[in-house]
Amino acid sequence: MNHYTDRLHAAIADRKTPALVGLDPRLDQLPESVVAAARSRTATETDAAASAFDEFCSRIIDVVAPLVPAVKPQAAFFEQYGPAGCQALQNVIRKARNAGLIVICDAKRGDIGSTAEAYASAYLAGADPDAAIWAADALTVNPYLGKDTLEPFVKVAIERGAGLYVLVRTSNPGAATFQDRETDGQKLYRCVGDVVESFNVESTGACGYGPIGAVVGATYPAELTELRAAMPRTPLLVPGFGSQGAGASEVAGGFDAKGLGALINSSRGINFAWRNARYSEQFAPEEWEQAVEAATKDMIKELADSTPAGVLQS
Amino acid sequence: MNHYTDRLHAAIADRKTPALVGLDPRLDQLPESVVAAARSRTATETDAAASAFDEFCSRIIDVVAPLVPAVKPQAAFFEQYGPAGCQALQNVIRKARNAGLIVICDAKRGDIGSTAEAYASAYLAGADPDAAIWAADALTVNPYLGKDTLEPFVKVAIERGAGLYVLVRTSNPGAATFQDRETDGQKLYRCVGDVVESFNVESTGACGYGPIGAVVGATYPAELTELRAAMPRTPLLVPGFGSQGAGASEVAGGFDAKGLGALINSSRGINFAWRNARYSEQFAPEEWEQAVEAATKDMIKELADSTPAGVLQS
């Protein structure tokens, strides 16, 4: 099976959940034991941070791999620690793929012509992890530069069985500044959405979706419902669940009638669950992996109880 | 002097040119001698490519440092070779700063909230190269996610004497897809431009410009002239000169009456000058650095002869 969304939907059906775990390591939030061990085996604080990120994310992957279909490492946090951080990102992507997870590299890349080709070729491994140095199944990309700058990414995605998630309606408070500007009755995000949907018409997989997805924030449930209807062939990546404030009812509009077509992301709420009042009484800091597991299972249950994604479990 | 654009304009005045040399290493275009030497000192093809990029860019820096104020490494080409490529990028940025050049890291980053903070903190060293792990003076960023997502970058830029270049009107053929969409008589790129200009009102340096710049392609000279007038406090980064087809007359509109306010970028036309018919008869492949020097001097002369930037030399 060489189509991204077919592979993704198979993984969703297997785990019976559309929950996506973001990997957002932040040094000041990591378990002290992980940081101390990393410091003891490295010579500089930069190397220690990178090593701690590698260890922390690897252990989260071990916990969540049996539970969820996919993980989404956020490149920015790794890049903070320079080439050593980049090495940790590469290790984490490999580790997640070896654990049977779909990996969406959240790097929000975008550039013109041959530069876009370079990014696409470097990040979009697709079905074969060895096809790209960063080994990701899918990549987030930014559409501002224009449709022609998305095309090199789309080409590589189709060739390699990889996926893209184009930023359409983001989850931040100021998303409307540019994305909601209206021309002839159509907001910019809908115009971007139409371009994304058009890429999927001739690359639809057996599951009925194409490989070119859209990022649509759970913090704007009306727009999520609108875009689900407007982009029937486009898989959605929905950030904003958990620490950004959206709950299961806010993401319900992202799914199709089968409970498919959307991945719901939670990062901090799972990564640092043991720091959350909901879990901190139940789990000691050294039991942080158990807190990660409990938070992941709770997210899966919330999605199952309150959204059409629940049909996956029936 | 701790203000980005004051530092930049001092460098422009010193070199008497607004020419910016992009560093876009491509393995299949590099001098064979550089690639062969890199292969002989490394164990893998990936490490060889990264090492060749490091060597090639370092030698370009040696050639151009006395001639131009700034260089712009393109992150994508380095990221193609994974963590080793990222290490080469870090080395190249350091090398350029040590050579007295302003370094604009062309990575087109952009994300929300604390993720934007992570990118800003990692890339924007500003006046003190040791303030950030990637040590750049300035960074290119993408505005699609909204004004609030630019603010963490603006904050760090002002604090550290660093610069930003926000994508406003890009140089690619399809730039109009989204950037030209018109709302109430105002195109999106003008709306983005207004936001960029607003950031500079309270952070204007002695030179009359703020630290938050705009990317405006030379391939659209009418828009360049329009934006120069609409953004009087905003320094411009103008790609598209040379191999993308724009000449000195197309970039003239980017300058103010003093010949300041814009950097004109050429990448491939300088990096691979010895492969260009204009220089290949004059220089043998092993004289590639002399071709780089000749192409840089020719660009400087063209800008001086045909644009207001010529006042810098008078």
Image (cartoon, coloured by chain):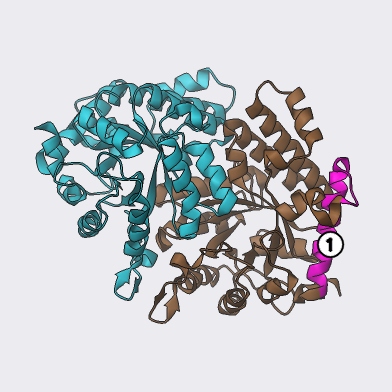
Chain colours: A cyan, B brown
Residue lying at 70% horizontally and 58% vertically, measured from the top left: B243
Residue B9, image x, y percentages: 72, 65
SS at mark 1 in the image:
helix
Q: Quadrant of the N terminus of chain A?
A: top left
A48 relative to A74 in the view: left or right: right
Name the residue nearer the viewer: B152 or A104.
A104
Residue segment shown in magenta: B281-305
- Would you place residue B235 above or below residue A111 in this image? below
Residue lying at 79% horizontally and 58% vertically, measured from the top left: B68
Name the residue nearer the viewer: A74 or B300.
B300
Name the residue nearer the viewer: B161 or A193.
A193
Residue A177, image x, y percentages: 37, 66
- Name the residue carrying label 1: B298
Residue at the far right: name it.
B282
Kindly identify the amino acid type of the residue bearing the numbered disc 1: Asp
B212 relative to A155 in the view: left or right: right
Predominant SS of the magenta segment? helix
Q: Quadrant of the C terminus of chain A?
A: top left
Instruction: Determine the image quadrant of residue B130.
Output: top right
Residue B48, image x, y percentages: 69, 29
Name the residue nearer the viewer: A77 or A281.
A77
Residue at the far front: name it.
A202
Q: Is residue B66 visible?
A: no
Residue lying at 57% horizontally and 43% vertically, measured from the top left: A118
- Would you place residue A73 above or below residue B191 in this image? above
Instruction: Determine the image quadrant of residue B29.
Output: top right
Residue A213, image x, y percentages: 34, 47
Q: Is residue B63 visible?
A: yes
Label 1 marks a residue whose chain is B
B213 relative to B285 in the view: left or right: left
Q: Is residue B291 magenta?
A: yes
Q: Is residue A50 magenta?
A: no
